[in-house]
Amino acid sequence: MELGMRDFLNKCGGAAVIDGGFATELERHGVDLNDPLWSAKCLFTSPHLVRRVHLDYLDAGANIILTSSYQATIQGFEAKGFSKEEGKTLLRRSVELAIEARNIYNDRCTKDSFDFIRDERYGRSRPILVAASVGSYGAYLADGSEYTGDYGDSVTVQTLKDFHRERVKILVDAGADLIAFETIPNKLDAQAYVELMEEEGIETPAWFSFSCKDENNVASGDSILDCASIADSCRQVVAVGVNCTAPRFIHGLISSIKKVTSKPILAYPNSGETYNPDNNQWEKSSVEAEEDFVPYIGKWRYAGASLFGGCCRTTPKTIRGIAEAISEKPHGKSI
């Protein structure tokens, strides 16, 4: 499986571009996401906008687009009044919309309808994968615990496996190329994902991406070395990295992850702001503004990462900048 990811990266020229913030773009199109389902709300209210955002990121040069299923769960849909079958349909729809966007994009490229396809980085030959986004248990709770990894003593590995099991199987069966286990805040989630994939015999490749609070620890305080080691132990995991993490921590985290795995490393940080679950707002960091982390991509690539994108509060402009940056020689500002 890991060879498959390396082959994909080779086809991308050695490094690949992941898309950027999804909710940010939906809000830019006028959507109110103050809802427990967050961006997954648009799967039934505005599916055309979900497809539109996917296309915006493909236009910007993304090689991997993530589905709008980060906060989509059967349990969450049922809480909104949908039946279990309707919830399953909405989960499948998240993958279908991304695949539809890829097909539309490829069709447009074939017809030479975009000026930028004259640039080979954005042309017909560019490989594009659909990654099914799986948010943590804390994302479903919508209480801020996805940013701390503190679910209480009653939540066990078995609890998490039972919660995610059917959801992951539905996303796989819908035709996703990858499973993106994102914003993982603790070792508990990581262990549950590993055991779940092994128990269910899931052969679709996956990546593990951890949310970190500094250069050495994930959000819960667990060591990034321990968490990355869990990911490295799983045959189905083809890449390990970090997301929804301040840019200033990325270089150190890449260096740490590289110590415990030879799998490709991914990095798609947020804009450097911090989410406050009490008022549902993103707040500016007390340190120097980090919104534009594109100048650091070359340095991160030199440190060992090979998949780059953006998380919360990043835009297609960010992703276009990343696509341009990785086409250059690995260098850049230090951070």
Image: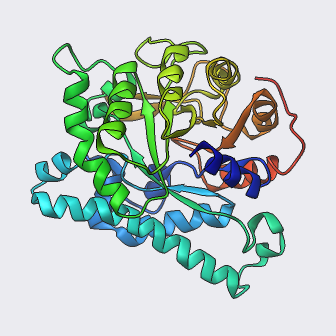
Give the residue at x 26% y 65%.
44
87 or 193: nearer the eye? 193
Q: Position of residue 209 (x, y in %)?
A: 51, 34
Q: Is residue 264 above or below residue 250?
A: below
Q: Position of residue 305 (x, y in %)?
A: 71, 34
The colour scheme used to paint the residues is: rainbow
Give the residue at x 41% y 61%.
30
Residue 32 visible here: no
Residue 248 visible here: yes
**Dividing the picture into quarters, in which one does residue 102 lie?**
bottom right
Q: Position of residue 84 (x, y in %)?
A: 12, 57
Which residue in the rendered view is the most extreme toward the bottom?
A: 111
Q: How many marks?
A: 0
**Dividing the picture into quarters, in which one does residue 248 lie?**
top right
Q: Position of residue 93 (x, y in %)?
A: 32, 66
> Is residue 328 left or right of 306 when viewed as pictured?
right
Give the residue at x 30% y 44%.
200
177 or 320: nearer the eye? 177
Give the residue at x 54% y 43%.
313
> Is residue 46 left or right of 307 when viewed as pictured?
left
Q: Is residue 124 above or below residue 237?
A: below
Quarter in which the C terminus is drawn: top right
Q: Is residue 268 above or below residue 35?
A: above
> Is residue 111 left or right of 104 when viewed as pictured?
right
